[in-house]
């Protein structure tokens, strides 16, 4: 079982990463998903 402290650290790390990786209208971020058959890419401007 994952302790509450561990979940808190994971959430804090996720917030820090999302804060740093942010798309803008001038430079949107690119999300790529590779499945066994296809490659999917989406451009996100958040």
Image (spheres, helix red, strand yellow):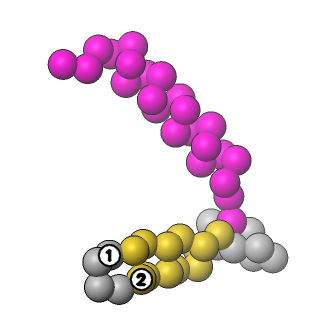
Answer above or below: position of 20 versus 24: above
Figure quadrant of the C terminus: bottom right
Residue 19 located within the stretch drawn in magenta: yes
Tag on residue 39?
A: 2
Look at 55% across and 32% down and name the residue there: 13
Judged left or right of residue 28, residue 14 is left
Look at 45% across and 29% down and name the residue there: 10
Residue 28 in picture, x, y percent from top left: 69, 73
Judged left or right of residue 44, residue 38 is left
Look at 52% across and 39% down and name the residue there: 14
Instruction: For label 1, count other residues whose C-alpha is less than 10 Å away and answer few (under 14), some (14-19) or many (20+).
Output: few
Instruction: For label 2, count other residues whose C-alpha is less than 10 Å away and answer few (under 14), some (14-19) or many (20+).
Output: few
Of all residues, the one furthest to the bottom in this rendering is: 38
Q: Which residue corresponds to mark 1?
A: 35
Could you tell me what secondary structure mostly forms the magenta stretch? Answer: helix
Magenta residues, as a range?
A: 1-23
Of 30 and 35, nearer the camera is: 35
Judged left or right of residue 41, residue 23 is right
- Distance between the Cα atoms at labels 2 and 1? 6 Å
Residue 3 in picture, x, y percent from top left: 29, 14
Answer above or below: position of 40 versus 33: below
């Amino acid at each position: 079982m994952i302790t509450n402290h561990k979940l808190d650290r994971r959430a804090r790390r996720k917030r820090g990463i999302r804060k740093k990786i942010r798309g803008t209208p001038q430079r949107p971020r690119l999300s790529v998903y590779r499945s066994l058959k296809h490659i999917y890419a989406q451009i996100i401007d958040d």
